[in-house]
């Protein structure tokens, strides 16, 4: 399929991108890796009048250790997350989740900012960022605002970003030495998750993110509350589908996904939480 006609602008700086967004408003879309937006445009599910190509904005491609947290530029590509020594040490869950996104071509083009801004419940990185308690930094005409990942996803493919705002940075608390697990259930290698689970556990923080279990990326809140209340990982995992609304599609029914979520959360917790009973 061929996208509808659009104008194309290429910018090299954040200021340039914000100026274009201010000029065109909701007629414009940022183009980062293009690996979610272009397929939508080809299916005519998105038809922006202007594409603002930010793929060469170098200032937003970084992974920094800032002391108590990690700062990741919105245009950092999945492959850079996958091989980052900083993430390997302080946020291995994110590096590992990135290594499971699509295939090498997708990982060399797609960006973490694009993955989050696209707000696809089937995407892997939003669940990992939710589980780790990340914060998103948006920049717009009014300056910068910090948005907790828990308040970022508004609906299916919809975030709280304004049309004139750009996601510039993702902040992840350093959870050095925390237990973690990423479970992605697919029919074939390199597929999207039928259901996925990103879990992290330390003395100070437990988070369990769910992939493809509703209209937005989700946290398994009931599971975490049960764990914090003293439940075993196995008992807590039975609550994995509470508050979810998984889709029914060619890959499985909603009931099948609920079952998968319980199984995958149990496996994830058994891996992430020390001294738990072995999987059966
Ligand atoms: C074959 C294939 C397989 C894939 N498999 C997986 C998978 O297994 N798991 C997975 O998680 N993902 C998968 N993806 C999606 C991939 O991860 C995308 O790269 C990612 O979801 C979007 O990132 P992008 O940089 O390509 O964004 P784009 O496609 O360029 O943009 C996506 C949306 O985000 C907006 N946007 C981009 N950057 C910003 C920003 N900085 N600020 C504000 N808005 C912004 C755009 O305007 C657009 O609306 C797959 C994609 C393909 C094509």
Image (cartoon, rainbow, N blue to C red):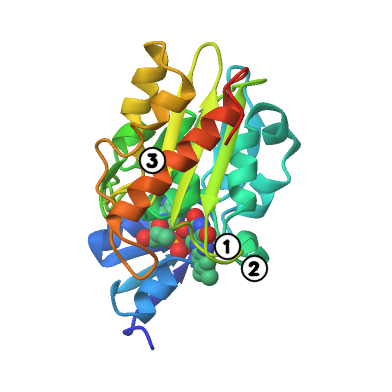
As drawn, 63 above or below 213: above
Q: Secondary structure at mark 3?
A: strand
Q: Tell me if label 1 and label 2 are in contact, CB under 8 Å.
A: yes
Residue name at image x 34 percent, y 40 percent: 218
- Above or below, 76 against 172 in this view is below
Residue where numbered disc 2 is placed: 105
Q: Secondary structure at mark 1?
A: loop
Would residue 31 appear left or right of 24 to someone viewing this image? right
Badge 1 residue CB within 8 Å of ligand 1: yes
Quadrant where the image shows the N terminus = bottom left
Q: Residue at x 72, y 41 (%)?
A: 84
> Residue 215's x, y, as percent?
27, 51
Observer-side mark, 1 or 3, equals: 1
Crowdedness of circle 3 by 10 Å Cα count: few (<14), some, many (20+)? many
Q: Is residue 55 visible?
A: yes
Where disc 2 sits, the SS reads helix
């Amino acid at each position: 399929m061929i996208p509808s006609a659009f104008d194309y602008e290429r910018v090299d700086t954040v200021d340039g991108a914000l100026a274009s967004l201010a000029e065109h408003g909701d007629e414009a879309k940022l183009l980062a890796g293009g690996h979610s937006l272009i397929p939508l445009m080809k299916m005519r599910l998105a038809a922006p009048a202007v594409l603002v190509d930010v793929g060469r904005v170098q200032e937003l491609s970084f992974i920094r250790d800032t002391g108590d947290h990690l700062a990741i530029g919105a245009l950092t590509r999945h492959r850079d997350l996958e091989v980052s020594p900083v993430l390997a040490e302080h946020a291995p869950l994110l590096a590992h989740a990135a290594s499971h996104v699509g295939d090498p071509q997708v990982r060399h083009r797609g960006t973490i900012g694009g993955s989050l801004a696209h707000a696809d419940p089937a995407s892997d990185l939003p669940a990992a960022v939710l589980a780790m308690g990340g914060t998103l930094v948006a920049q717009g005409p009014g300056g910068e605002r910090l948005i907790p990942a828990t308040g970022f996803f508004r609906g299916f493919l919809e975030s709280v970003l304004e049309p004139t705002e750009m996601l510039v940075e993702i902040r992840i608390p350093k959870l050095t030495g925390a237990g973690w697990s990423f479970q992605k259930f697919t029919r074939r290698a390199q597929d999207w998750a039928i259901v996925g689970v990103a879990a992290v556990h330390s003395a100070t923080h437990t988070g369990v993110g769910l992939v493809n279990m509703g209209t937005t990326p989700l946290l398994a809140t009931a599971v975490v509350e049960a764990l914090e209340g003293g439940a075993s990982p196995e008992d807590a995992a039975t609550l994995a589908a509470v508050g979810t609304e998984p889709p029914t599609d060619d890959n499985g029914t909603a009931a099948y996904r609920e079952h998968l979520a319980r199984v995958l959360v149990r496996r994830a917790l058994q891996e992430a939480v020390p001294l738990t009973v072995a999987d059966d």
